[in-house]
Every structure is written in C-alpha cells, then in structure tokens.
Image (cartoon, rainbow, N blue to C red):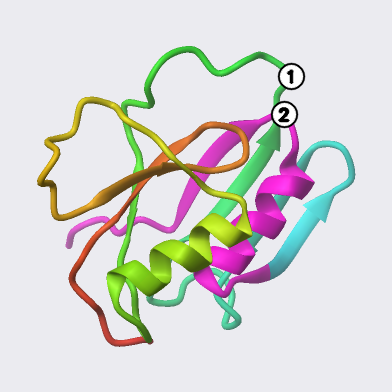
Amino acid sequence: MACRIGEHVLTCRGPEVLARFWCEVLDFVLLDREEGVYIEIGPREGFGGPQPTIFLIRNDEPKNGHARLHIDVNPTDRDQEAELERLLAAGAKLVDIGQPADASWHVLADPEGNEFCLLKRRLDPL
C-alpha cells in the first residue's frame, strides 16, 4: 500500500488572510480552527476525501527565499487566462522566479508571498 497526501501544512503570519484566499482559490471551506494557533481548510467533504486539506499554522517569522515545495493549481470551469484574472482579483500577484518567457504556466504568490503555479490544462471539478 502507498501513502497519500492527507494535508498540506503552511506556516504563515496571517492564517485568517490565507484561509480566505485559499478558500476562494480552491472553493474550500473552514474545517477546524484553534484561535491564534491554526486554521484547517479543505473540501466540503472534509479530511480524507480526494483532495488534501490545508493546515495554516501561525508563525511570525518572515518567509526566507523561494519555497522548495509549492502548489500547482489547474482551472476547472474556465480557461487559464480567465482563471488568472480571478486569482489576481482574489489577491494573488504575478511573480518572476526565472521561468521562461514562453512558459505555459503562470507563477503567482499568495498574499504572504508563497509561490504557486497556475497550469494551463483544465481538470474536471471533483
């Protein structure tokens, strides 16, 4: 038997801000919280479903450098450019980490500067 990713853990200065952002990006909901410590967000069916949850743990230390692990997202109900507009309106920022000018993906950062990529290929919604 193999392992499966159950949750992603992200330390951050503002769990509330990132929870709102990632809930908007992924259509997730608040699942659990301990005030001032962590917030868990995830799909409506909760932990253990086809998608992992995200634990946002409060940490006041600044982010240092590029993330060694990042999230890739795929549009589900619109094309890549329309999804890019939606993500930028939600608070994402385009960033340049040295990706090729003709890359088929966009590199963005969430409100705390954590990089993630918007891929071109559409996936069916779950």
Expressed as whole percent of the image width and height from the top left, the position of residue 123 reads: 25, 79
Residue occupying image coordinates x 73% and y 42%: 15
Image quadrant where residue 69 sits: top left
Amino acid found under the numbered disc labelled 1: Asp
Q: Distance from label 2 to label 1 (Cα)?
A: 5 Å
Residue occupying image coordinates x 13% and y 47%: 103
Is residue 100 shown left or right of residue 85? left
What is the magenta range? 1-29
Asked if residue 76 is positioned above or below residue 4 in the image, the reply reads below
Q: Secondary structure at mark 1?
A: loop
Q: Are marks 2 and 1 in contact (CB under 8 Å)?
A: yes
Of the two numbered discs 2 and 1 on the same chain, state the one appearing first in sequence. Answer: 2
Residue occupying image coordinates x 29% and y 69%: 80
Residue occupying image coordinates x 10% and y 46%: 102
Quick one: quadrant of the N terminus? bottom left
Q: Which residue is mark 2?
A: 13
User: Mark 1, residues whose alpha carbon is within 10 Å: few (<14), some, or many (≥20)?
Assistant: few
Is residue 83 shown left or right of residue 103? right
Asked if residue 11 is positioned above or below residue 15 in the image, the reply reads above
Which disc is residue 79 wearing?
Answer: none
Expressed as whole percent of the image width and height from the top left, the position of residue 16 reads: 78, 48
Image quadrant where residue 124 sits: bottom left
User: Mark 2, residues whose alpha carbon is within 10 Å: few (<14), some, or many (≥20)?
Assistant: some
Quick one: quadrant of the C terminus? bottom left
